[in-house]
Amino acid sequence: MVPVEVLGDEQWLRRVEAVTDATLSRLDVADLFDELLDRVRELLQVDTAAILLLDVRAQQLVATAARGLEEEVRQGFRISVGRGFAGRIALTRQPVIVEDVTSEKVVNPVLLQTGVRSLLGVPITARGELVGVLHVGTLTPRRFTPDDLRLLELVADRVSLASLARANTLDHTAALALQRSLIPTELPNVPGLEMAGRYIPGHASGVGGDWYDVFTLPSGWLGVVVGDVSGHGLQSAVVMGRIRSALRAYALICDDPAEALTLLDRKVVHFEAGSLTTALYAMISPDNSTVHVSLAGHPRPVLAAHDRPNTVLPVHIDPPLGTGRQRPQRHTTTIEFPPGAVLVTYTDGLIERRGELFDTGLARLTGAVPLAPVDTVATTVMATLDVERPADDIALLALRRLS
């Protein structure tokens, strides 16, 4: 056995400084993992070091970074919680030392093929939850000391912080990809209509539950949707995606917007409990002259037309989706859409301001809608309502019937 090394206070402090160095924070997560493993190999004078992170759904540890065991990462090695050396650490959330590695104590073939003789491993935890396992090994027999264990636990704490940042980054990337896939960058080309949409997140994550959607129906009618799922972030975007898809499905079997929203309400109450959603669903006739509109807790659209003042349309507002109350009778309002007119639909983030009456923001929007091409409409409305730093998500969809 390698003799136990007794560390003085000064030598211990130098080791601690090496793994808590502030400059490590400037590295991205992958580089930080590699740098920490390089430093721990040098400080503990070990031959191998590895980080395995927990796949929560599979309840397996996944080899994520390694030094001296790179093949483990290349093979995407996985080990179930409870199995083998690393699995036992994950299960008990306690350090484990193996002074004499055998096939009975270790199930990872890479460790056995590499010839590792002694192992020290510790759990990686964050906020009381298991994140993964960090372990080091030597190719000669080694008796690890309490100082070795303390240092490895310090490194595990640093890894846990980095893994949280990694998870947040992955969630954010996934959320942005989801949001981009659900909010159309190009709207359908419909003869006789112009359309323009805008989406502005009101949260630092850049992701929320607001959306707009336009789709043609087999009947020749055009479906128009603007909706707002409560909350922000990935969860709201996921719920929004499910609600958006469900409404598209109901639109195929319902010729009445109120009927489609009634079915959607049942779906939200049953499958999306706790997710309050407002929505506007409109159907525009094949000749573009008529719009059938139903509102579920959603603000009324604004119509600008020739020879009349801009108007907030007198559409009945039914309860939002997902309230769980007795099923309400929903209403559809039919409105005329004259040639040259502009219809503006939106979510409440466009007009609501802290300390200001809702009607004040609605009046500001109503006065801001010009009779102009829809891109000009969207740009003018956004500029007039000053939405550069919104407190809430904003979705805007403007439609213009061509003369």
Image (cartoon, helix red, strand yellow):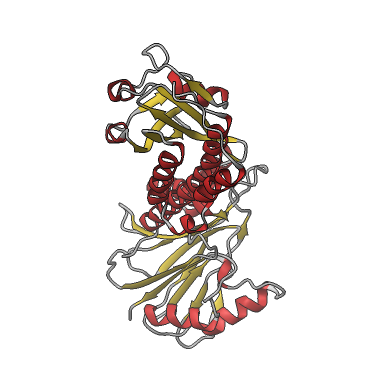
Q: Position of residue 149 (x, y in %)?
A: 55, 32
Q: Residue at x 61, y 80 (%)?
A: 363
Residue 92, quarter of the rendered image: top right
Judge by depth and name the residue closer to the eye, 305 or 97.
Answer: 97
The answer to whether residue 378 of the structure is visible from this angle is: yes
Percent x, y of residue 43 = 46, 41
Q: Quadrant of residue 189?
A: bottom left
Q: Which image quarter holds the C terminus?
A: bottom left
Q: Is residue 225 above or below residue 2?
A: below
Question: In the drawing, does residue 361 fall left or right of residue 44?
Answer: right
Q: Nearer the viewer, residue 329 or 296?
A: 296
Q: Considering depth in this image, is 7 or 169 the residue closer to the camera?
A: 7
Furthest residue in direction top, as rendered: 104
What residue lies at 40% left-to-right and 29% top-to-bottom?
A: 137
Q: Give the number of callouts.
A: 0
Seen at 51% across and 86% down, the residue is 308
Residue at image point 48% right, 52% down: 237
Q: Relative to residue 223, is residue 71 depicted above or below? A: above
